[in-house]
Image (cartoon, rainbow, N blue to C red):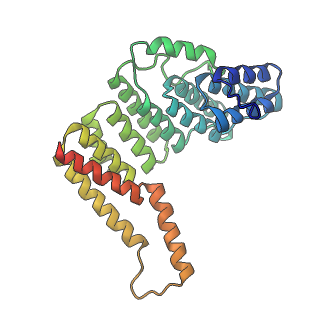
Amino acid sequence: MKNSSIIPSQPIFANIISGCLKANKLEKAWEVFDTMRLSYHQPDEVSYTLMLHACAKMEEHYGFQPDKITYNTLLTACSRKKDLSQARNILNVMWNDMKEKGADSLLAPDEQTFTNLLWCYASYQPTRSTNKTSEATGSSTALTTTECLMPTEIPRKRSDVAKEARWLFKLAVSHNIQVTTALLNAYLTVHISQKQPTEAVNIYTKMFDKFAVKKDGFTFSQMLEYCYKQKDGVLAWKVWEDYQTFLESKNQEFGIKENVEESIMEKKARQARKEAAAIREGWADQQQRELCITMANTLAR
Protein backbone atom coordinates (compact mmCIF):
# COMPACT_ATOMS: atom_id res chain seq x y z
CA MET A 1 0.00 0.00 0.00
CA LYS A 2 2.85 2.37 0.81
CA ASN A 3 4.60 1.60 -2.48
CA SER A 4 1.48 2.38 -4.52
CA SER A 5 0.86 5.64 -2.61
CA ILE A 6 -2.67 4.49 -1.79
CA ILE A 7 -3.92 5.48 1.66
CA PRO A 8 -6.55 3.00 2.87
CA SER A 9 -9.51 4.45 4.72
CA GLN A 10 -10.34 3.61 8.31
CA PRO A 11 -13.19 1.24 7.31
CA ILE A 12 -10.74 -0.74 5.15
CA PHE A 13 -8.34 -1.09 8.08
CA ALA A 14 -11.25 -2.10 10.31
CA ASN A 15 -12.31 -4.79 7.83
CA ILE A 16 -8.75 -6.15 7.64
CA ILE A 17 -8.47 -6.25 11.44
CA SER A 18 -11.88 -7.94 11.68
CA GLY A 19 -10.79 -10.57 9.15
CA CYS A 20 -7.61 -11.24 11.13
CA LEU A 21 -9.63 -11.74 14.30
CA LYS A 22 -12.07 -14.12 12.61
CA ALA A 23 -9.09 -16.15 11.37
CA ASN A 24 -7.52 -16.02 14.86
CA LYS A 25 -4.49 -14.20 13.45
CA LEU A 26 -4.19 -12.00 16.52
CA GLU A 27 -0.61 -10.88 16.03
CA LYS A 28 -1.45 -9.82 12.48
CA ALA A 29 -4.44 -7.87 13.79
CA TRP A 30 -2.16 -5.93 16.13
CA GLU A 31 0.33 -5.38 13.31
CA VAL A 32 -2.38 -3.89 11.07
CA PHE A 33 -3.67 -1.75 13.95
CA ASP A 34 -0.18 -0.39 14.63
CA THR A 35 0.35 0.30 10.92
CA MET A 36 -2.86 2.30 10.80
CA ARG A 37 -2.10 4.14 14.03
CA LEU A 38 1.50 5.04 13.23
CA SER A 39 1.34 5.68 9.50
CA TYR A 40 -2.17 6.53 8.34
CA HIS A 41 -5.06 7.31 10.68
CA GLN A 42 -5.91 7.86 14.32
CA PRO A 43 -7.94 4.80 15.33
CA ASP A 44 -11.67 5.37 15.57
CA GLU A 45 -14.28 3.82 17.86
CA VAL A 46 -14.69 0.77 15.63
CA SER A 47 -10.95 0.09 15.56
CA TYR A 48 -10.61 0.33 19.32
CA THR A 49 -13.62 -1.93 19.83
CA LEU A 50 -12.04 -4.53 17.54
CA MET A 51 -8.79 -4.38 19.49
CA LEU A 52 -10.69 -4.91 22.71
CA HIS A 53 -12.01 -8.09 21.08
CA ALA A 54 -8.39 -8.95 20.29
CA CYS A 55 -7.49 -8.58 23.96
CA ALA A 56 -10.31 -10.93 24.91
CA LYS A 57 -9.24 -13.48 22.27
CA MET A 58 -5.61 -13.40 23.40
CA GLU A 59 -6.73 -14.33 26.89
CA GLU A 60 -8.99 -17.08 25.52
CA HIS A 61 -6.45 -18.68 23.15
CA TYR A 62 -3.10 -18.03 24.79
CA GLY A 63 -3.92 -17.47 28.44
CA PHE A 64 -2.65 -13.92 27.97
CA GLN A 65 -4.45 -11.26 29.97
CA PRO A 66 -3.85 -7.60 29.17
CA ASP A 67 -2.74 -5.76 32.30
CA LYS A 68 -3.84 -2.42 33.69
CA ILE A 69 -1.29 -0.60 31.51
CA THR A 70 -3.14 -1.88 28.42
CA TYR A 71 -6.49 -0.78 29.77
CA ASN A 72 -5.19 2.56 31.04
CA THR A 73 -3.86 3.22 27.54
CA LEU A 74 -7.28 2.40 26.09
CA LEU A 75 -8.82 4.90 28.52
CA THR A 76 -6.47 7.55 27.15
CA ALA A 77 -7.70 6.71 23.66
CA CYS A 78 -11.32 6.99 24.86
CA SER A 79 -10.56 10.44 26.22
CA ARG A 80 -9.16 11.60 22.87
CA LYS A 81 -12.14 10.13 21.04
CA LYS A 82 -14.60 11.53 23.63
CA ASP A 83 -15.98 8.02 24.02
CA LEU A 84 -17.33 7.97 27.57
CA SER A 85 -19.45 4.88 26.94
CA GLN A 86 -16.44 2.72 26.12
CA ALA A 87 -14.47 4.20 29.02
CA ARG A 88 -17.19 3.16 31.44
CA ASN A 89 -17.20 -0.35 29.96
CA ILE A 90 -13.44 -0.57 30.50
CA LEU A 91 -13.78 0.48 34.15
CA ASN A 92 -16.49 -2.14 34.67
CA VAL A 93 -14.17 -4.85 33.36
CA MET A 94 -11.27 -3.71 35.52
CA TRP A 95 -13.42 -3.39 38.62
CA ASN A 96 -15.07 -6.80 38.20
CA ASP A 97 -11.69 -8.44 37.64
CA MET A 98 -10.42 -6.89 40.88
CA LYS A 99 -13.51 -8.06 42.79
CA GLU A 100 -13.22 -11.57 41.39
CA LYS A 101 -9.46 -12.10 41.76
CA GLY A 102 -8.55 -9.77 44.61
CA ALA A 103 -4.81 -9.41 45.07
CA ASP A 104 -4.17 -11.61 42.01
CA SER A 105 -5.93 -9.19 39.67
CA LEU A 106 -3.79 -7.65 36.95
CA LEU A 107 -6.47 -5.05 36.26
CA ALA A 108 -7.07 -3.48 39.67
CA PRO A 109 -7.62 0.25 38.96
CA ASP A 110 -4.92 2.62 40.19
CA GLU A 111 -4.47 6.39 40.25
CA GLN A 112 -3.61 6.41 36.54
CA THR A 113 -6.84 4.55 35.76
CA PHE A 114 -8.95 7.16 37.53
CA THR A 115 -6.91 10.03 36.08
CA ASN A 116 -7.44 8.79 32.52
CA LEU A 117 -11.08 8.04 33.26
CA LEU A 118 -11.73 11.55 34.57
CA TRP A 119 -10.17 12.97 31.41
CA CYS A 120 -12.85 11.00 29.54
CA TYR A 121 -15.47 12.87 31.57
CA ALA A 122 -13.68 16.16 30.89
CA SER A 123 -13.60 15.66 27.11
CA TYR A 124 -17.12 14.25 26.85
CA GLN A 125 -19.85 16.48 25.44
CA PRO A 126 -23.36 15.21 26.26
CA THR A 127 -25.97 15.46 23.52
CA ARG A 128 -29.62 14.51 23.15
CA SER A 129 -28.61 11.43 21.14
CA THR A 130 -26.22 10.25 23.86
CA ASN A 131 -28.34 7.33 24.97
CA LYS A 132 -28.76 5.81 21.52
CA THR A 133 -25.05 6.12 20.89
CA SER A 134 -24.18 4.41 24.15
CA GLU A 135 -26.51 1.52 23.43
CA ALA A 136 -24.97 0.98 19.99
CA THR A 137 -21.45 1.14 21.36
CA GLY A 138 -22.19 -1.09 24.30
CA SER A 139 -23.59 -3.84 22.14
CA SER A 140 -20.54 -3.90 19.87
CA THR A 141 -17.83 -4.43 22.45
CA ALA A 142 -16.40 -7.60 23.86
CA LEU A 143 -16.03 -5.90 27.22
CA THR A 144 -19.59 -6.46 28.36
CA THR A 145 -19.99 -7.60 31.94
CA THR A 146 -22.62 -9.40 33.97
CA GLU A 147 -22.26 -6.93 36.84
CA CYS A 148 -21.77 -3.22 36.21
CA LEU A 149 -20.15 -0.74 38.55
CA MET A 150 -21.39 2.10 36.36
CA PRO A 151 -25.03 2.75 35.42
CA THR A 152 -26.10 1.52 31.99
CA GLU A 153 -27.20 4.95 30.78
CA ILE A 154 -24.49 7.55 30.25
CA PRO A 155 -25.22 11.09 31.51
CA ARG A 156 -27.26 13.37 29.27
CA LYS A 157 -26.58 16.68 31.03
CA ARG A 158 -23.36 18.42 32.02
CA SER A 159 -24.43 18.50 35.64
CA ASP A 160 -24.94 14.73 35.56
CA VAL A 161 -21.52 14.19 33.95
CA ALA A 162 -19.91 16.17 36.79
CA LYS A 163 -22.03 14.38 39.39
CA GLU A 164 -20.87 10.98 38.14
CA ALA A 165 -17.26 12.20 38.11
CA ARG A 166 -17.60 13.28 41.75
CA TRP A 167 -18.94 9.84 42.64
CA LEU A 168 -15.97 8.21 40.93
CA PHE A 169 -13.52 10.46 42.75
CA LYS A 170 -15.08 9.54 46.09
CA LEU A 171 -14.93 5.89 45.07
CA ALA A 172 -11.22 6.20 44.33
CA VAL A 173 -10.50 7.90 47.66
CA SER A 174 -12.56 5.33 49.59
CA HIS A 175 -10.45 2.54 48.03
CA ASN A 176 -7.18 4.22 49.02
CA ILE A 177 -6.25 5.28 45.50
CA GLN A 178 -3.40 7.78 45.77
CA VAL A 179 -4.57 11.33 45.04
CA THR A 180 -1.93 12.87 42.79
CA THR A 181 -1.53 16.23 41.09
CA ALA A 182 -2.49 14.64 37.77
CA LEU A 183 -5.64 13.11 39.27
CA LEU A 184 -6.78 16.40 40.80
CA ASN A 185 -5.96 18.28 37.59
CA ALA A 186 -8.21 15.88 35.67
CA TYR A 187 -10.92 16.24 38.32
CA LEU A 188 -10.63 20.04 38.12
CA THR A 189 -10.84 19.97 34.33
CA VAL A 190 -14.04 17.90 34.45
CA HIS A 191 -15.80 20.66 36.36
CA ILE A 192 -14.38 23.42 34.19
CA SER A 193 -15.29 21.74 30.90
CA GLN A 194 -18.72 20.69 32.18
CA LYS A 195 -19.40 24.26 33.36
CA GLN A 196 -19.59 23.67 37.12
CA PRO A 197 -17.94 26.91 38.36
CA THR A 198 -18.60 26.61 42.09
CA GLU A 199 -17.12 23.13 42.35
CA ALA A 200 -14.19 24.05 40.07
CA VAL A 201 -13.18 26.93 42.36
CA ASN A 202 -13.62 24.69 45.41
CA ILE A 203 -11.28 22.08 43.94
CA TYR A 204 -8.63 24.70 43.19
CA THR A 205 -8.84 26.58 46.48
CA LYS A 206 -9.42 23.71 48.92
CA MET A 207 -8.93 20.18 47.61
CA PHE A 208 -5.24 20.39 46.73
CA ASP A 209 -4.54 21.47 50.31
CA LYS A 210 -6.94 18.88 51.72
CA PHE A 211 -5.01 16.04 50.09
CA ALA A 212 -1.61 17.72 50.56
CA VAL A 213 -1.08 17.70 46.80
CA LYS A 214 1.00 20.37 45.06
CA LYS A 215 -0.35 22.32 42.12
CA ASP A 216 1.69 22.38 38.91
CA GLY A 217 1.77 24.43 35.74
CA PHE A 218 -1.17 22.55 34.25
CA THR A 219 -3.30 23.42 37.28
CA PHE A 220 -2.67 27.13 36.81
CA SER A 221 -3.18 26.89 33.06
CA GLN A 222 -6.61 25.31 33.50
CA MET A 223 -7.66 27.86 36.10
CA LEU A 224 -6.50 30.87 34.09
CA GLU A 225 -8.46 29.56 31.09
CA TYR A 226 -11.45 29.24 33.41
CA CYS A 227 -10.98 32.82 34.65
CA TYR A 228 -10.76 34.06 31.07
CA LYS A 229 -14.03 32.38 30.09
CA GLN A 230 -15.75 33.55 33.29
CA LYS A 231 -14.29 37.08 33.00
CA ASP A 232 -13.16 36.73 36.60
CA GLY A 233 -10.25 39.14 37.00
CA VAL A 234 -10.16 38.89 40.80
CA LEU A 235 -9.68 35.13 40.81
CA ALA A 236 -7.25 35.44 37.90
CA TRP A 237 -4.97 37.64 40.01
CA LYS A 238 -5.00 35.06 42.82
CA VAL A 239 -4.17 32.26 40.40
CA TRP A 240 -1.43 34.40 38.85
CA GLU A 241 0.12 35.12 42.24
CA ASP A 242 0.01 31.41 43.08
CA TYR A 243 1.67 30.70 39.75
CA GLN A 244 4.48 33.18 40.38
CA THR A 245 5.11 31.59 43.79
CA PHE A 246 5.22 28.20 42.10
CA LEU A 247 7.78 29.43 39.53
CA GLU A 248 9.95 30.94 42.26
CA SER A 249 9.98 27.62 44.09
CA LYS A 250 11.05 25.84 40.91
CA ASN A 251 13.84 28.33 40.28
CA GLN A 252 15.08 27.76 43.82
CA GLU A 253 14.82 24.00 43.41
CA PHE A 254 16.88 23.92 40.22
CA GLY A 255 19.02 27.02 40.75
CA ILE A 256 22.70 27.06 41.64
CA LYS A 257 23.24 26.67 45.38
CA GLU A 258 25.26 29.37 47.12
CA ASN A 259 28.92 28.56 47.80
CA VAL A 260 28.62 25.37 45.74
CA GLU A 261 30.90 24.86 42.78
CA GLU A 262 29.74 22.61 39.99
CA SER A 263 31.51 21.17 36.99
CA ILE A 264 30.34 21.59 33.41
CA MET A 265 28.85 18.09 33.48
CA GLU A 266 27.03 18.77 36.75
CA LYS A 267 25.64 22.01 35.32
CA LYS A 268 24.40 20.22 32.21
CA ALA A 269 22.83 17.45 34.30
CA ARG A 270 21.05 20.02 36.48
CA GLN A 271 19.80 21.86 33.41
CA ALA A 272 18.56 18.61 31.89
CA ARG A 273 16.65 17.77 35.09
CA LYS A 274 15.14 21.25 35.09
CA GLU A 275 14.00 21.02 31.47
CA ALA A 276 12.50 17.56 32.01
CA ALA A 277 10.64 18.72 35.11
CA ALA A 278 9.41 21.86 33.31
CA ILE A 279 7.90 19.81 30.49
CA ARG A 280 6.45 17.22 32.88
CA GLU A 281 4.95 19.82 35.22
CA GLY A 282 3.80 22.39 32.68
CA TRP A 283 6.19 25.31 33.23
CA ALA A 284 8.44 25.19 30.15
CA ASP A 285 9.22 28.53 28.48
CA GLN A 286 6.51 28.17 25.85
CA GLN A 287 3.93 27.26 28.47
CA GLN A 288 4.92 30.27 30.58
CA ARG A 289 4.45 32.55 27.58
CA GLU A 290 1.03 31.08 26.91
CA LEU A 291 -0.05 31.71 30.49
CA CYS A 292 1.16 35.31 30.25
CA ILE A 293 -1.00 35.79 27.16
CA THR A 294 -4.01 34.19 28.84
CA MET A 295 -3.61 36.42 31.88
CA ALA A 296 -3.30 39.55 29.73
CA ASN A 297 -6.37 38.59 27.71
CA THR A 298 -8.33 37.94 30.91
CA LEU A 299 -7.55 41.37 32.30
CA ALA A 300 -8.37 42.99 28.95
CA ARG A 301 -11.90 41.58 28.83
Which residue is drawn at the image coordinates 36% and 49% (left, top)? 219
**Number of numbered tags placed on the structure image:** 0
- When asked about the image quadrant of residue 102, the answer is top right
Give how far across and how far down residue 136 sits, in percent: 56, 13
Which residue is drawn at the image coordinates 19% and 40% (left, top)? 231
Question: Above or below — where is 268 with respect to 259?
Answer: above
Outermost residue to the front:
4
Does residue 13 appear in the picture of this structure? yes
Give how far across and how far down residue 170 sits, in percent: 41, 36
- When asked about the image quadrant of residue 30, the answer is top right
Which residue is drawn at the image coordinates 17% and 42% (left, top)? 301
- When asked about the image quadrant of residue 63, the answer is top right
Residue 220 versus residue 90: which sits nearer the camera? 220
Residue 95 versus residue 183: which sits nearer the camera? 183
Residue 70 in the figure: left or right of residue 195: right
Give how far across and how far down residue 2 sits, in percent: 74, 34
Quarter in which the N terminus is drawn:
top right
Residue 206 versus residue 192: which sits nearer the camera? 192
Does residue 283 appear in the picture of this structure? no
Residue 20 versus residue 192: which sits nearer the camera? 20
Question: Above or below — where is 264 with respect to 115?
Answer: below
Question: Above or below — where is 43 with respect to 133?
Answer: below
Which residue is drawn at the image coordinates 40% and 45% (left, top)? 184
Residue 50 in the figure: left or right of residue 279: right
Give how far across and how far down residue 276 sits, in percent: 51, 61
